[in-house]
Amino acid sequence: MADGILLIDKPEGCTSADVVRAVKRRHRPSSVGHLGTLDPMATGLLPLCIDGGTRIAQFLGAEHKAYTGRIRLGAETDTLDVTGKTVAEAPVPQITAERLTAAVAGFLGDTQQVPPMYSALKKGGKRLYELAREGVGVEREPRPIHLERFEVAPSAVEGELDFEVRCSKGTYVRVLASDLGKALGTVAALATLRRTEFGDFRITESSSLDAVLEREPGDLPVLAPREALRGSKEIAVDEKTAFGIAAGQRYVLDRLEPPVSTEALGAVIAPNGRLLAVLEEKEGAWRLRRVVMPEASELYRP
């Protein structure tokens, strides 16, 4: 079994946990977990950490994500998407290009967003979606989000809008759809959603779940940990330095070329070309975050 990150194009109708279970049953990795949960109605990019790939999961939080989808105007649901129960309806005014452009502009850049009740956030030790199912509503504090790009256009289906958005992590696209409906003088719900980017990963690199399940057990098209950390600064080291870092000798890091201010993470590459450790920049110097190779013998593994 190869260590690394498996990029799946999640199909509609299954949970992210369902995808993990399916890969486990077919390929029997010793450990597997997913990054960035997708709702069952959503499709698109779902990264899975396979075996040794789990050791870098904490460094793949994805500061930004990108989606495409469709918004349905005229009806709002309790879940803010079309899988929920309709709780409000309103007429849809004429949406001119000028009106749409003005409404969308209000969401760009740094804004605040109130998380939805149907979310995994906790209040008083209980998930918000659990409270929502009990008919309990609680006050939620707005959270800062950032929209780098938000493009919206009338869909081929009357009363619906197609969109593309590139946003910071923690952004709820369901809430964005609902808020846009209000900005246009009506109500709205998210009709479809597809994730196309997760940090430095792209949907074009992914494999369908069916294709992955059809492969021979253990044969997975993973990105090696070194490739998965493509946004980090690579730092190649010699054998002596590699063994020092593997042993957790922090003073060895002083031998490395110091980081520049924009280099948040450093990927230490062993002489065999594999990822040895992950560093972080702190006060102008490198600090050890994690040794990825748990055994020094792996330094000799190709």
Image (spheres, rainbow, N blue to C red):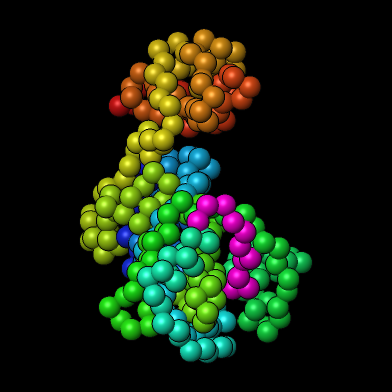
Which residue is rendered at x = 56% and y = 21% of the image? 286
How many marks overall? 0
Asked whether residue 23 is in view, the answer is: no
Which residue is rendered at x = 52% and y = 52% of the image? 109
Say whether residue 113 is magenta.
yes
Q: Quadrant of the C terminus?
A: top left
Q: Quadrant of the N terminus?
A: top left
Q: Position of residue 219 (x, y in %)?
A: 26, 49
Res 288 → quadrant: top right
Q: Position of residue 100 (x, y in %)?
A: 43, 70
Q: Which residues are magenta?
A: 108-118
Q: Position of residue 17 (x, y in %)?
A: 46, 64
Q: Position of residue 142 (x, y in %)?
A: 67, 61
Res 16 → quadrant: bottom left
Near-viewer residue (177 or 91): 91
Is 35 situated left or right of 219 in this image? right
Which residue is rendered at x = 48% and y = 60% of the image? 105
Which residue is rendered at x = 70% and y = 67% of the image? 140
Q: Which residue sits furthest front? A: 98
> As displayed, is residue 275 above or below residue 179?
above
Q: Which residue sits furthest right? A: 124
Near-viewer residue (160 or 228): 160
Is 45 situated left or right of 131 in this image? left
Near-viewer residue (47 or 265): 265
Asked whether residue 273 is in view, the answer is: yes
Near-viewer residue (212 or 142): 142
Say whether residue 241 is magenta.
no
> As displayed, is residue 103 above or below residue 293?
below
